Image: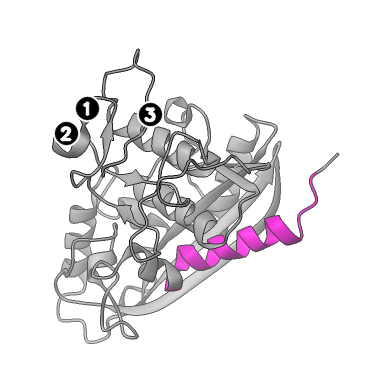
Amino acid sequence: MMHHTNVDPAHRVVPQTSDIDHMIFQALQRRDPFCYFFRRDGIPKFAAQFSGWLSVGDHNLSDNKHVSSIAVLECSLGEPCQNSSHMLLYACSTNPGKLREFALAVDQCGAGDLQLEPLPNLRRINPPEETGTSFEDNAALKAVYYSRLTSELVFADDSGLEVKALNGAPGVLSARFAGPGADDEANNALLLENLRDAPDRQARFVCVIAVAREGSALTTFRGEVEGEILDAPHGDGGFGYDPLFFYSAFGRTLAEVTAELKFSVSHRGKALRAMIRWLTQDYSKPR
């Protein structure tokens, strides 16, 4: 039997990719009662593409080429999920890959009291200029900037790849290594060009998360994972430099493993888990 989300009959138009990502991400964190989780061997599944088993209203989304991602709720198979969130935290990112990992962190950590959502109208807000020279600098300036737009807690991350043979490059420029607006393919191609014939391929991913509230930075969390850069991409999962990043403990790149397995060792996974521990154990909300 195929389950589907229950949508108001008045809304029959399939949204564009960003709206779908936002809608499902919010549903995931809010434990909305109209969403269902498909339990397969007891492990939460996150699909990079719709694969034919989800429909919204009368619309089957599997053939919609504009749809990029989906996350579904964990609950008992076929039973409505209940809203148990109490602490609201806004994520200051529109990157679909990062948003999926943020959702996965909350799910894996069992942080049922933490309601994590993208900052409202984030795509319409002019982003701050990332002028920092370190991941810490950029994460903090973004978190403080966006925290002035709400009274709730916000967090922002800055992450990237540091390659030993390139003296730490691309570093804070990882997302725009091949220039402003560059995509993953262009950034990966430039990295391989710069590493041509380089004997030392050691590298590390770094993620720093900053938490802020109403214009004040509260704390930061850092995560790292060590690996090496291959001479050609392998795998079609993940995002960014994942297809080139070989993790020896897995014997494959981070693009060749499941999202859950990657997240268990990744730089962003480590930083997010540290942030969630702090929020659920140590943080005291101002009265």
Would you name the residue on which mark 3 appears?
Answer: 6
Does residue 100 appear in the picture of this structure?
Answer: yes
First in residue order: circle 2 vs circle 3: 3
Look at the picture and state if 276 lies above or below 247.
above
Q: Position of residue 83 (x, y in %)?
A: 59, 39
In the foreground, 132 or 186: 186
* The C terminus, quarter of image: top right
- Asked whether disc 1 touches disc 3, contact meaning CB atoms under 8 Å apart, the reply is no
Sort mark 3 into few (<14), some (14-19) or many (20+) by Cα contacts within 10 Å: some
Would you name the residue on which mark 2 appears?
Answer: 64
Q: CA distance from mark 2 to mark 1?
A: 9 Å
* Numbered range of the magenta stretch: 265-285
Q: Residue at x 48, y 26 (%)?
A: 121
Q: Secondary structure at mark 3?
A: loop
Q: Is residue 278 magenta?
A: yes
Three-letter code, disc 1: His
Q: Is residue 109 magenta?
A: no
Sort mark 1 into few (<14), some (14-19) or many (20+) by Cα contacts within 10 Å: few
For residue 155, side relative to residue 284 (left or right): left
Q: Closer to the camera: disc 1 or disc 3?
A: 3
Q: Secondary structure at mark 2?
A: loop
